Image: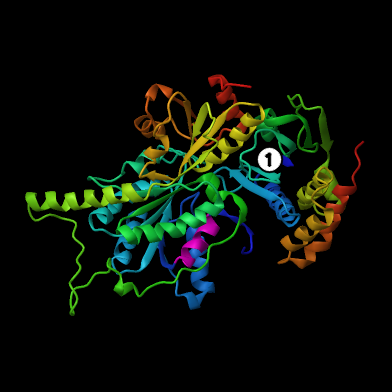
Amino acid sequence: MKKELLFSGIGGQGVITLGETLCDAAIKAGYNVTFVPFYGQEKRGGRTMCNIVVSDGVESPIISEADIMLIFDERSLRDYQSLMSEGGTMILNSDLVELEPETACKDIRRIPFSTMAQEVGNSKTANVIALGYIAKFLPMIPYDLIAAEVERSFAAKPKLIPLNLKALKTGYDYTDR
Amino acid sequence: MGKKEFLQGNQAMAESAIRAGCKLYFGYPITPSSEVPEYYAKAMIERPEEGITFIQAETEVSAFNMVAGAVATGHRAMTATSGPGFSLGQEAVSYMSAGDLPGVIVEVMRPGPGDGEILASQGDYFQAVKGGGHGDYQTLVLAPYSVQELCELMQESFELAEKYRNPVILLSDATLAKMRESVELPGYVEQKDPASKPNALRGCGKNEPHKVVTCGDGPVQWEEFNARLQAKYKRIAENEVRYATYNLEDAEIILVAFGSMARVCESAMKMAREKGLKVGMIRPISLWPFPDKAFEGITGKKFLVCELNAGQMVQDVKLAVENKRDVYFYGKLGGTTPSPKNVLAEIEKLGGESK
């Protein structure tokens, strides 16, 4: 088993945190995991991207093709759509990405993560909703492990735990087709 | 088997250095090495029982010289830096070499020249391996390719530095430094009394004095001084070559790569094998001394050297192989790292024999 993931957005959207949380859960599920972040020199508003590989054996931390790609802004789409696997799933935050992807990938999902976050009650939870949504495509990482890692990542701000668990569930339960 | 933890390269490496008995850290923060000084600064405050000292110098020039001064007392000391900072430290590396001082330096490569960028590169191979400072000196250069190896070679750097009383450079890069993966942290290394180490300065008492000398007192004497250094480098070259080989038995194409690029190549090799292409790999771990002997006696094969630079290690490979016309190069200039699929495409261009 090998899954290659690429998540990309703008600094502050929580794409890197989303990736790290997923990795922590994948480790608990017993897989080999590598996480490599890429970001610019800007303190805020720069590009942020991460490569994640979840596998049984030791693999290159640099991905060849994304089985799952999460895109939170249009520049990310332009930069990384060429790395999309034809048979994979491309997930776009439709509130922020209007561009039509140029890719052979058939499975493109446009999900309004930002709108959903406002409905959940906090626009900052868009990344956690996206994590919940992605979890459906990675059944080998049990949902409960991911929820436990979301909880752990907010250990310093326990008041925010219920909100974020709700956001995670909202993403996980969302059906788009 | 100990506990595996999911840690970042820089942080796991810093913890391994502390456990190797390196209680003195001098540095100036620079991406992508900044988590190392940050880790030491925190450890100094949070683990007072371990007696850790962290000093943020005003520049890398000072940090490198602080390392030189500290190791002259027999204590273990290090600094970590990247590109521009590594350049600033080169004068001190030359002096440490002359003074037989076992300083340990981590260089986390990022693409230059100039300020460059902050992502992965291997563009400082020449600077690390061929000597960025002045004079006929050599430093041991070790190149890990996983977080686990980063930790193990971090500890080994201190052992080798003291064994040969010579600076050691641990050559990391932005991918290894920023990457998180599972690692079993190495344990604590028991330390002798620093003052009892042969590299510790001694001026008085019953023992033979030990002085640090970096300048000559005559042309004949300086020739002898340098001859002694060269004899030491010969000893190191004979004893400290490190490399790994993969699938060489039937390989038609042999990838040659180090550091994070070797990690990419390992996956590319697997993909090629699945397609029936006979591909192997030689992975230099010690870049100096360069593992010439890994190439000895291999004829009639193609060597594909893959680097994150315009072609630096490839020159050493050409010196090591039987026929330099067998050597091909694939490189990216840093910032973006080729994927296993990109390397596979290069292998296919060379036409590995399919069966």
| Relative side of A114 to B97, left or right | right
Q: Residue at x 72, y 41 (%)?
A: A2
Q: Is residue B208 magenta?
A: no
Disc 1 packing (10 Å; few <14; some 14–19; many ≥20): many
Quadrant that contains the C terminus of chain A: top right
Relative to B346, residue B307 above or below: below
Relative to B17, residue B233 above or below: above
Please give the range of residues in magenta: B10-20
Residue A149 in percent (x, y) is at: 75, 59
Residue B131 in percent (x, y) is at: 31, 44
Residue B63 in percent (x, y) is at: 36, 59
Kindly identify which chain the residue marked by label 1 belongs to.
A
Work out whether residue A14 or residue A91 is closer to the camera in this orientation and state it: A91
Which secondary structure type mostly characterizes the magenta part of the structure?
helix
- Tell me the amino acid under the disc marked 1: Ser
Q: Which residue is mark 1?
A: A8
Q: Residue at x 51, y 32 (%)?
A: B255
Work out whether residue B253 or residue B314 is closer to the camera in this orientation and state it: B253
Relative to B234, residue A166 above or below: below
Q: Residue at x 23, y 45 (%)?
A: B136
Work out whether residue B34 or residue B98 is closer to the camera in this orientation and state it: B98
